[in-house]
Image (cartoon, rainbow, N blue to C red):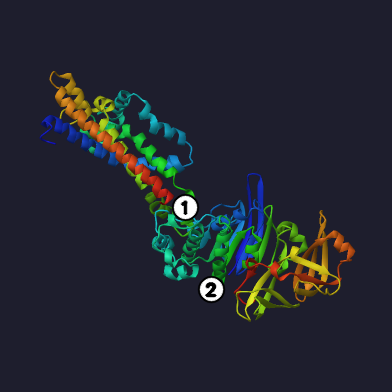
């Protein structure tokens, strides 16, 4: 793989994998919480939460990226506080790319987990409670095992989406080789220079392979949710 | 051991105002569908919260609106058997049975013991989806038992099963009552289940308790016939097996005399319970001769209830027991069947089916 890809191309692939991995891992707990709240919660502002989660899906990615820059840039209200207190800057860093990717992938992740939660029969949770299980235990021993394939499917989808994120990423963290140049940014950059097509095509093949692999994996896991819940 | 319930709850235009005490044994909540039975059991379990009132189990307060007490479902220490078995699909039969012990630290008996009691020992390593409806329901009962509850709540546990499956489970429920001594609150609108299992009956209509007491009394109250259903009306009698005849009949000693029934599966001397439907009882003013029916008991008319239709319900005293007979108004007039009249109750032996006979009762029922 390394021999087949040039060092610059390999750098982009490795960076994309790193960014997507962290984007997925860190958004998973929030995704689970949001999915739980949307599937089961009854509270004021549930609709607002639903919009917020889905907003990155319908907003132009460039707008999302620019909003991130305004908020998390060094001068932005959140970015300046993070810089002052923890010395963390996100803008023009790979961590910023991870943030952008996680926000863009969030709706897909929440949707997959939410569907899995909605497929769980609350009557099973009632039965567990009558057997002596507290709410936490009901969640960890009944709900969670039943939705686990859904969570994995959501994570795989989010990972694939993060791998392909371009608009928000390039607006928020630019296109710095080795720092923020992910596979899509690299493809874009290669296409801007004469003779870059071969590199671009190699990266396109990698991107296609990863996307298809993720879709197949996600589909297979979704089918397992259905089977697991029906008990077959 | 007793459960006391006094609750009010309004929902969807329906008002539940239910007050009753369930003594030790099997208390059956009987009522038509929509009478509020399930709401009562769910309130006891804590799955729904009444608007007002109090629920206590063995003196332990589970719910008290005045004191704002509402013990959480998982801390109420009760077993709940639902209409649908609600087995956990991701766990094996064994892990379903041991759920309370493994997850909640409740109970911890060997599942083999309960498995033997319910006839599910051979299923322990199976996945739940491969079980039949009757097997799944027995596993659900076992799972609730193994959590060692203070009381077992059963909400129409046989309703989702077909006739043969019902007949398959009823004997296990009888064994359960006899061997565990566990108090059970049992919801049903099936008369055969009432007759075989109940040691106490609470009749519910439109969210209110209309009558409660021993089955022998409640079921032979002619005023309750409307609620119980005219076709299902009938007496439940305690009897002792007196003799097994070689021609396939068993003689049963009642307080008013002996009757013959098709072979009863219980040893001589065993106490059993027999349900005799009102529509299977014929009345005669004089001792009938030359009749194929084998069972003729002298009785005295206690009450005659005329309904809207052509039939009347006659309540009879037979020794220390009570019987119900359903005859036409015309016959009642013709034979002058009035309160205090002495007559004979005639029953065909074959009219009593095996499903109406409960064997292996505890003494004192």
Where B176 sits versus B258, above or below?
Answer: above
**Mark 2 nearby-residue class (10 Å; few <14, some 14–19, many ≥20):** few
The disc numbered 2 marks a residue on which chain?
Answer: B
Q: In the shown orientation, is residue B312 left or right of residue A81?
A: right
- Image x and y of residue B272, in percent: 64, 74
- Residue B46, by quadrant, is bottom right
Pointer 2 residue: B179
Q: A54 or A216: which is nearer to us?
A: A216
The disc numbered 1 marks a residue on which chain?
Answer: A
Q: Which mark is residue A124?
A: 1
- Image x and y of residue B26, in percent: 60, 67
Residue found at x 30% / y 38%: A216
Please identify the quadrant where the N terminus of chain B is shown.
bottom right
- The Cα atoms of the two marked residues, 1 and 2, are separated by 28 Å
Residue found at x 56% / y 59%: B157
Find numbered disc 1 in the image and state the secondary structure of the residue it sits on. Answer: helix
- Image x and y of residue B138, in percent: 50, 62
Where A208 sits versus B364, above or below?
Answer: above
């Amino acid at each position: 793989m390394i021999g087949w890809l040039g060092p610059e191309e390999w750098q982009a692939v490795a960076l994309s994998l790193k960014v997507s991995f962290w984007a997925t891992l860190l958004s998973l707990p929030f995704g689970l919480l949001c999915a739980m709240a949307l599937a089961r919660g009854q509270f004021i502002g549930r609709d607002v939460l639903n919009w917020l989660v889905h907003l990155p899906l319908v907003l132009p990615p460039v707008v999302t990226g620019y909003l991130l820059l305004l908020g998390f840039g060094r001068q932005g209200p959140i970015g300046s506080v993070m810089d002052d207190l923890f010395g963390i800057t996100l803008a023009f860093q790979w961590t910023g790319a991870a943030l952008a990717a996680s926000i863009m992938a969030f709706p897909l992740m929440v949707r997959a987990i939410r569907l899995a939660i909605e497929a769980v029969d609350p009557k099973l949770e009632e039965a567990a409670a009558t057997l002596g299980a507290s709410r936490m235990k009901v969640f960890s021993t009944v709900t969670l095992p039943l939705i686990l394939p859904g969570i994995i499917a959501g994570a795989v989808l989010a990972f694939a989406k993060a791998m392909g994120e371009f608009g928000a990423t390039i607006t928020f963290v630019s296109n710095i080789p080795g720092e923020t140049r992910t596979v899509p940014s690299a493809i874009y950059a290669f296409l801007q220079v004469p003779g870059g097509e071969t590199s671009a095509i190699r990266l396109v093949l990698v991107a296609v392979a990863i996307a298809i692999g993720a879709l197949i994996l996600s589909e297979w896991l979704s089918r397992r949710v259905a089977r697991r819940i029906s008990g077959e | 051991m007793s459960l006391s319930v006094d609750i009010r709850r309004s929902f969807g235009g329906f008002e539940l105002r239910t007050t009753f005490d369930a003594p030790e044994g099997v208390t059956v909540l009987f009522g038509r569908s929509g009478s509020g039975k399930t709401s009562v059991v769910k309130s006891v379990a804590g799955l729904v919260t009444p608007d007002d009132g109090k629920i206590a189990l063995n003196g332990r307060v589970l719910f008290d609106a005045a004191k704002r007490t509402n013990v959480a479902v998982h801390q109420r220490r009760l077993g709940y058997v639902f209409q649908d078995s609600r087995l956990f699909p991701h766990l094996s039969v064994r892990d379903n049975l041991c759920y309370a012990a493994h997850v909640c630290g409740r109970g911890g008996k060997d599942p083999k013991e309960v498995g033997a009691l319910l006839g599910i020992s051979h299923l322990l390593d199976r996945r739940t989806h491969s079980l039949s409806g009757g097997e799944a329901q027995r596993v659900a009962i076992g799972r609730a038992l193994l959590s060692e509850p203070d009381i077992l709540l059963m909400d129409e546990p046989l309703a989702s099963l077909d006739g043969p499956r019902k007949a398959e489970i009823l004997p296990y429920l009888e064994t359960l009552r006899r061997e565990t001594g566990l108090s059970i609150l049992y919801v049903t609108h099936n008369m055969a289940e009432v007759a075989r299992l109940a040691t106490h009956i609470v009749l519910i209509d439109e969210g209110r308790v209309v009558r409660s007491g021993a089955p022998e009394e409640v079921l032979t109250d002619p005023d309750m016939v409307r609620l119980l259903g005219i076709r299902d009306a009938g007496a439940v009698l305690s009897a002792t097996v007196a003799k097994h005849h070689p021609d396939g009949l068993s003689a049963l000693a009642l307080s008013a005399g002996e009757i013959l029934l098709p072979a009863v599966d219980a040893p001589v001397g065993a106490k059993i319970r027999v349900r005799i439907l009102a529509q299977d009882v014929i009345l005669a003013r004089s001792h009938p001769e030359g009749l194929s029916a084998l069972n003729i008991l002298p009785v005295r008319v206690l009450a005659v209830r005329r309904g809207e239709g052509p039939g009347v319900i006659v309540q009879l005293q037979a020794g220390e027991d009570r019987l119900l007979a359903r005859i036409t108004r015309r016959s009642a007039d013709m034979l002058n069947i009035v309160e205090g009249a002495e007559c004979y109750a005639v029953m065909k032996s074959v009219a009593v089916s095996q499903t109406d006979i409960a064997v292996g009762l505890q003494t004192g029922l």
